[in-house]
Image (cartoon, coloured by chain):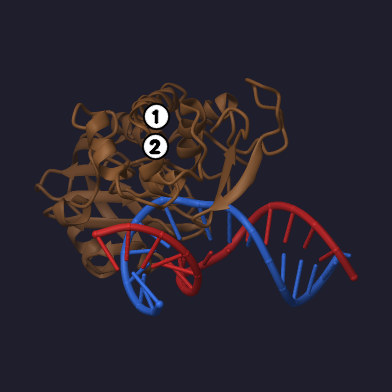
Chain colours: A brown, B red, C blue
Amino acid sequence: MPELPEIETFVRELEPDLAGRKVVDAAVHWSKIIAVPTAEEFCQQIVGEEFVSFGRRAKYMLLGLNSGATLIVHLRMTGHLHVLPADAQPDKHTHVVMRLDDGHTLHYQDPRKFGRLWLVGDVEPILSKLSAEPLSAEFTTKWLSERLQSRNAPIKALLLDQTISAGVGNIYADEALHLAGIHPTRPGASLKAGEIKKLHAAIRIVLQQGIAKHGSSLGGSVLTNYRRPNGELGQMQDEFQVYGREGEPCHTCDKPIERLVIAQRSSHFCGKCQK
DNA sequence: ATAAGGCCCTGACCGC
DNA sequence: TGCGGTCAGGGCCTTA
């Protein structure tokens, strides 16, 4: 599923194709995919806009437009944004089509229909609750420590909380906990200072590795939930130590990787390396 | 305030 | 081969 590294890859690789392009026509085929404004207003307002800046906040793509408005895209589970030739036919999972002034079209596809698009003048109301960017200087060990203290929920659940570690999802949470040697069921408040320091470092390391590997791609079907904008697969899945490896030997100690459901999400961990 | 559970969706997968 | 049931899962909402 697309998490911070996947979204970062998306934004970086979309920029060369979208920078300076103007939207000349837009159609929405499934209206709920537009969170703000209405689908009709979206189609009217996006026409004439030019893509001028490309950013990311946590798992949100921020596509800046020449009017000052921002097109925010969240891919959730199975969303894709692709720049395609003009004659590319929308398939049954294509919910938004934007025709560009250079003859290409921008398609938003999403089999699960969980993703959302916002077209707004002010991004703040949508992004205001997010924690600091985990790769920024603002995200310190102290910052993380303050948000874990007095929390009794399992650390795995807390890492998925976007007000604690923004941009971290199920995969990178499992990988970070393994790298830090921390068991996913540990209550947040039970972590010692040294463990939080290790966890803080581990979050940054796995996210940076994910970006370097252009994200992770899983599955081999239409639900292959992440591809780079050019259709290529990411490479991070080859580096996983625990995620999706239930029953396979831990690369460190050979003990089979275990799986447990925590906060309605599957968690993968090594019972020997993670205390 | 925190924590837990439900909901949105539908392709994949399993058992019969 | 076909059918029904179950699962996955991010973020938001409701409930306790």
Task: Specify whether A6 is left or right of A244.
Answer: left
Task: Specify whether A46 is left or right of A32.
Answer: left
Q: Position of residue A54 (x, y in %)?
A: 23, 36
The correct choice, above or below, for A214 with respect to A126 in the image is above
Q: Which residue is at a point 53% across and 45% down the rendered structure image?
A: A225
The correct choice, above or below, for A254 with respect to A103 in the image is above
Q: Is residue A86 visible?
A: no
Q: Nearer the viewer, residue A7 or A275?
A: A275
Q: Position of residue A200 (x, y in %)?
A: 34, 29
Q: Position of residue A173 (x, y in %)?
A: 45, 38
Amino acid type shown at disc 2: Leu
Q: Which residue is mark 1?
A: A195
- Real-space Cα distance between discs 1 and 2? 6 Å
Question: Mark 1 near mark 2, Cβ–Cβ under 8 Å?
Answer: yes
Q: Image quadrant of residue A137?
A: top left
Q: Image quadrant of residue A30?
A: bottom left
The correct choice, above or below, for A190 with respect to A262 in the image is above
Q: Which residue is at a point 72% across and 37% down the rendered structure image?
A: A247
SS assignment at label 2: loop
Task: Specify whether A144 is left or right of A184.
Answer: left
Q: Subunit of mark 1?
A: A
Disc 2 packing (10 Å; few <14; some 14–19; many ≥20):
some
Q: Nearer the viewer, residue C8 or A79?
A: C8
Task: Specify whether A30 is left or right of A44.
Answer: right
Q: Is residue A30 visible?
A: yes
Amino acid type shown at disc 1: Glu
SS assignment at label 1: helix
Q: Nearer the viewer, residue A242 or A57?
A: A242
Q: Position of residue A179 (x, y in %)?
A: 49, 26
Q: Subunit of mark 2?
A: A
Q: Which residue is mark 2?
A: A191
